[in-house]
Amino acid sequence: MTSKPAVYEFNAAIVREPARSVVNGLRADDRGNPTYDGVKAEHAAYVATMRAAGVEVTALPALEAFPDSIFVEDPALVFPEGAILLRPGAETRVRETVEIAPTLKAMFGTVVDLPTPGYADGGDVLTTPRSVMIGLSARTDRAGAEGLIASLDRLGRKGEIVQTPEGVLHFKSDCSLLDGETMLSTKRLARSGVFKGFREVLIPEGEEPAANALRVNDVVMVGADYPRTIAMLDKLGYQVVALKTTEIGKIDAGLSCMSLRWHRGQRL
C-alpha cells in the first residue's frame, strides 16, 4: 500500500497564460503598471520550475477580458478528491469561475459549487495536514467561508475559519506551508496565534511579501527580491528556488496564486 502524499506533494497543476490586459490588473497599492513582457517572463520561469519539480502542468490560454485571470487559484480550489468552484470577492473577477469550470469538470470526477450567498478567494485558503484554513478578508466574507466549509465537507475535508491581518489582501499574502509541521509567516500574522501547534519561521522585517512562498515537492519557491528570507530558509536546510516576482507583485500577486495544484492518483 502506498502512503498518502503530503499536502505539498503535487504531480499535476493548472496555470493560465497571462493576457496582455494583465497590465491593468487589480492592485491595492499602486506602484505603477507591470509590463506584459515582465509578467510573461516571470510566469514562464514559474511554470518551468514547477515542471522541473516533477509536476505535469496544463497551461490554459490567456483571457483578455479578465486581466487578473493569470491568478487561477482565486476562482477555484483543487484537491485529489475533487474541485470547488469559488466566487471571487472582486466583482471584475466573478466570471473567471465560469471560464475555468469546463476544464475542472473535464479533469475531476467531483466538482462542487460554492453555495450562495457569500464570496471566497482561493488566496485566502491554506491547506495544512490538520485542516483547510480559510482567512476572512476583503475578498472572503463569513458567509463565503461557511459555505466553503460545507463544500470541503463534501470532499471529506475539514475547514476552519481564521482571520487575515487588517490591511492584508489575502491570508496567504502573509503565510505559506514549508513542510508538514512548519509555517513561514509574517510577525503580524503569527502574533494572532493562528499557527499554534506548528513550528513558525518568521519573515525578516521589511520582507513581508516573501511570506507568500510555495512548497512544491522538494523545493520551496521564494520571491528573488527577498535575500534575507532566502538565506534564512537555505540555512534551515530547505531547497530554495528564487523566482522574480517584481512585476506580478505590482498587481498584488505572489507565487501561490499562479497555479492550481494537486496530486493526481490513479482515479479522481
Image: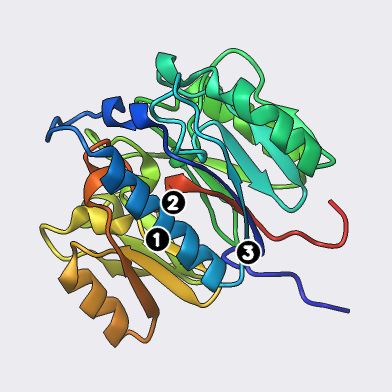
| Residue 35 placement, left or right of 4 | left
Q: Which mark is residue 45?
A: 1
Choose the circle earlier in sequence order: 2 or 1: 1
Three-letter code, disc 3: Phe
Q: Position of residue 120 (x, y in %)?
A: 50, 28
Q: Position of residue 52 (x, y in %)?
A: 53, 72
Q: Position of residue 56 (x, y in %)?
A: 65, 61
- Work out whether residue 213 or residue 42 is closer to the camera in this orientation and state it: 42
C-alpha span from label 2 to label 1: 14 Å
Which numbered disc, 3 or 1, marks the residue closer to the eye? 1
Q: Residue at x 21, y 28 (%)?
A: 28
Q: Which mark is residue 186?
A: none
The quarter of the image holding the N terminus is: bottom right
What is the secondary structure assignment of the residue under circle 2? helix
Three-letter code, disc 1: Ala
Three-letter code, disc 2: Ser
Q: Residue at x 49, y 35 (%)?
A: 74
- Work out whether residue 216 or residue 56 is closer to the camera in this orientation and state it: 56
Which residue carries the number 3 mark? 10
Which quadrant of the structure image shows residue 108? top right
Query: Callout 2: 10 Å neighbours few (<14), some, many (20+)?
Result: many
| Residue 127 placement, left or right of 248 | right
Q: Position of residue 100 (x, y in %)?
A: 63, 30
C-alpha span from label 3 to label 1: 18 Å
- Work out whether residue 102 or residue 162 is closer to the camera in this orientation and state it: 102
Q: Which mark is residue 256?
A: 2
What is the secondary structure assignment of the residue under circle 3? loop
Q: Is residue 48 above or below residue 105?
A: below
